[in-house]
Amino acid sequence: MTSPHFKQLRQAYGFDDVAIVPGDVTINPDQTDVSLTIGNIKLDIPILASAMDGVTDVNMAIAMSKNGGLAVLNLEGVQTRYEDPDKVLDQIASCPQSEVTALLQKLYQEPIREDLVQERVRQIKAAGAVCAVSVAPANTKRLAPVVEKAGADILVVASTVTSARHISKSERGLIFEELCASLSIPVVVGNCVSYSACLSLVKTGVAAVLIGVGPGAACTSRSVLGIGVPQITATIDCAAARDTYFEETGRYVPIITDGGFHRGGEISKAVAAGADGVMLGSIFAQAKGAPGRGYHWGMANPHPALPRGTRIKVGTTGTLEQILYGPSSLTNGTQNLVGALKNTMGLCGAANIGEMHKAEMVIAPSIITEGKVWQFAQGQVK
């Protein structure tokens, strides 16, 4: 008796399932180029801080820009709902865990103020920093002209899952081709995890695509909704879409792996899998001066009917400069992220991000645990 075939499943891999094979030629790490270009904006490092209230505020956006990266300010969070967001952030950080979701649901009911949207953009630009801001698709038509007029450099349109085609009751929804054509600033869109979805998005004229559904430390979409693809497989599939589009048109649209990072080695793995850049949340929430005060929460956490996120305590481990460039005071790979990436690229003989895409990778589920019994016993590996 033969069994019928309905769905064929394939294996998918996350960061802990794979390893990078060193190259036959090595390069001095200080000779590697890790820059990332989004539209007309060139960043010295391919690292973005996520658009979450516990990660990015005006000060973090300025600091990240001065350190060569980019922090994306969420225009639907407390920064644009309250004149003094610090008081609200103090309230969130001091709330008992059992009550925090209800508190967030209440706090995020306050309407978004367009005057505060303009003010936050102007504060970032006044410091000479690159300004990237994020909105959900539902608010894009309303807020995109506001942020462009205020002087923002990059607009990010992001939700848990974003597609080039969306069916709704609206007579005319958000059309990315029209959005990109109407704005003078680059548009970054996310999130997606498949070849076909990414290919559809890059064809709309966007400047970059965010990759990842539900991998974030504070996100619970995978458990609540059951959706998502582990980040290595998602990155490989979407990188293939980027390359297909480039071969067909000559236009290169970078992909940015978003979420699920805990250590520097995972950034290297994402780049080896095909990412042009990465977006981090919980790692930067641990920086001194981060708006979350040692806490981190997902932006779907305040949803009035189906919260998908949880506030987590990440603590404070060091300055933003330490996290990015060292000197590292920790041995767990959460500091000197740029140094780690440059060293890995050097060991793989990759002079730039494009060459790092060619690095060999292997399936290696024991890569984190092999030979580390004493570190596990002493709690040094988590």
Image (cartoon, rainbow, N blue to C red):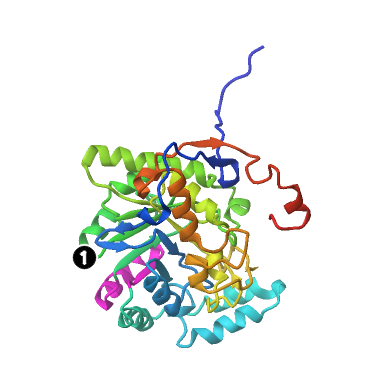
Task: Tell me what residue is drawn at x 32 percent, y 72 percent.
Answer: 130
Closer-to-camera residue (315/9): 315
Residue at x 37%, y 49% (from the top left corner): 353
* Residue 137: x %, y % from top left: 38, 61
Residue at (21%, 63%) from the top-left corner?
Answer: 182
135 and 229: which one is in front? 229
Task: Report x, y in % for residue 351.
Answer: 36, 48
Q: What secondary structure is the magenta-colored segment mainly?
A: helix
Query: Which residue is the extreme one toward the top?
Result: 1
Q: Residue 248 location, x and y as percent?
A: 24, 37
The C terminus sits in image quarter = bottom right
Asked if the magenta segment contains residue 136, the reply would be yes
SS for tag 1?
Answer: loop
Task: Give the magenta range.
Answer: 130-152
Mark 1, Cα crowd under 10 Å, few <14 / some 14-19 / many 20+, is few
Task: Report whether residue 193 is seen.
Answer: no
The image shows a total of numbered marks equal to: 1
Q: Position of residue 247 (x, y in %)?
A: 26, 37
| Vertical arrangement, residue 22 with respect to residue 255, above or below | above
**Residue 172 sits above or below residue 90 on the image:** above
Q: Is residue 321 visible?
A: yes
Give the quarter of the figure containing the N terminus: top right
Tell me the residue at 29%/54% (across/down). 206
Place residue 19 in its image quadrant. Answer: top right
For disc 1, the marked residue is 184
- Amino acid type of the residue that numbered disc 1 sits on in the rendered structure: Ser
In this picture, residue 20 sits left or right of residue 375: left
Rendered position, 25 above or below 91? above
Residue 55 colored in magenta in the image:
no
